Amino acid sequence: MKSYQNLKNDVEQKLKNNKKENALGVISKSVFKAVRKVRTGVLINSKFFNYE
């Protein structure tokens, strides 16, 4: 059976890993949203403001 300290260390390591993954997830989602907004803006601008 694992000691309390070993269990505590395992849990802390898992939490750190989860925080890193969550941070990466949040960053990638915000970048994706920004790119999507830019693409939408480009499509709207090319549709309505193309005077060629």
Image: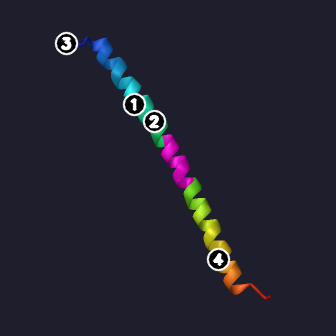
Q: Could you give the CA–CA distance between mark 3 and mark 4, rounded to whole angstroms?
A: 61 Å
Judged by its main secondary structure, the magenta piece is: helix
Q: Quadrant of residue 41?
A: bottom right
Residue at image position (33%, 19%) is 8
**Mark 1 belongs to which amino acid?**
Leu
Read off the residue under disc 3.
1
Q: Nearer the viewer, residue 8 or 39?
A: 39
**In the rendered image, the vertical position of residue 45 relative to residue 38, given as above or below:** below
Span shown in magenta: 23-30
**Image depth: mark 3 or mark 1 in front:** 3
Residue 33 placement (x, y as % from top left): 56, 60
Read off the residue under disc 1.
15
**Image depth: mark 3 or mark 4 in front:** 4
Q: Which mark is residue 19?
A: 2
Is 27 inside the magenta-drawn segment?
A: yes
Helix or strand or loop: what does disc 4 sit on? helix
Q: Could you give the CA–CA distance between mark 3 and mark 1, rounded to whole angstroms?
A: 22 Å
Residue 21 placement (x, y as % from top left): 46, 39
Q: Could you give the CA–CA distance between mark 2 and mark 1, rounded to whole angstroms?
A: 6 Å
Circle nearer the N terminus (3, 1): 3
- Are the residues tagged 2 and 1 within 8 Å (C-beta)? yes
Helix or strand or loop: what does disc 3 sit on? loop
Circle nearer the N terminus (1, 4): 1
